[in-house]
Image (cartoon, helix red, strand yellow):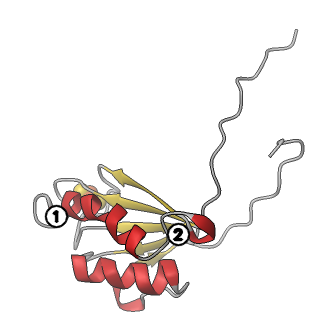
Amino acid sequence: MTIDAPPKPSISPYKHYVLLCTGPRCGEEGAGQALYDSLWTKLKAAGIHEGPGRTKFNSVNCFGACKGGPVLCVQPQGTWYYNVTPTNLDRIIAEHLVGDQAVPDLVFHQSPQVDVPAQRGSGG
Ligand code: FES
């Protein structure tokens, strides 16, 4: 007996994926949400809301790393930033998301790079 798998989801190509904590223990109350609310406009102004530099983003309720927030993670590099003020968010966008260089003084953790083997027959 064969069980049919559900259709695979699809996702449009992107270069970076930003996850930003909007949780209540991350910096001043509402700071993460205010950053999140500004993100689309900032990405658009930097020209990385679409095209080859496209940056996806989502909010997260808590990463379990609440000191020194707001906290932001850039994937696929697994680079974790703290103290993400509006000015520091501008630096992360300009230096990391556009310039492909992490901002060392704002990084509190760097995940190891992991190679993911290509799937056969993924169909795209
Ligand atoms: S509330 Fe932001 S990491 Fe916990």
Instruction: Give the residue type at disc 2.
Output: Gly
The residue to which callout 2 is attached is 78
Q: Which quadrant of the figure has residue 35? A: bottom left
Task: Tell me if 3 is positioned left or right of 83 in this view.
Answer: right
Q: Considering the image in quadrants, where does the N terminus appear?
A: top right
Residue at the farthest top position: 1
Q: Closer to the observer: label 2 or label 1?
A: 1
Spatial CA span between label 2 and label 1: 22 Å
What residue is drawn where x is 27% and y is 75%? 84
Q: Is residue 32 visible?
A: yes
Is residue 107 something that shows in the picture? no
Nearer to me, 29 or 108: 29
Q: Is residue 44 left or right of residue 27?
A: right
Front one among 54 and 16: 54
- Whole-percent x, y for residue 9 in the image: 65, 36
- The image position of residue 96, as x and y in percent, is 48, 82
Ligand 1 quadrant?
bottom left
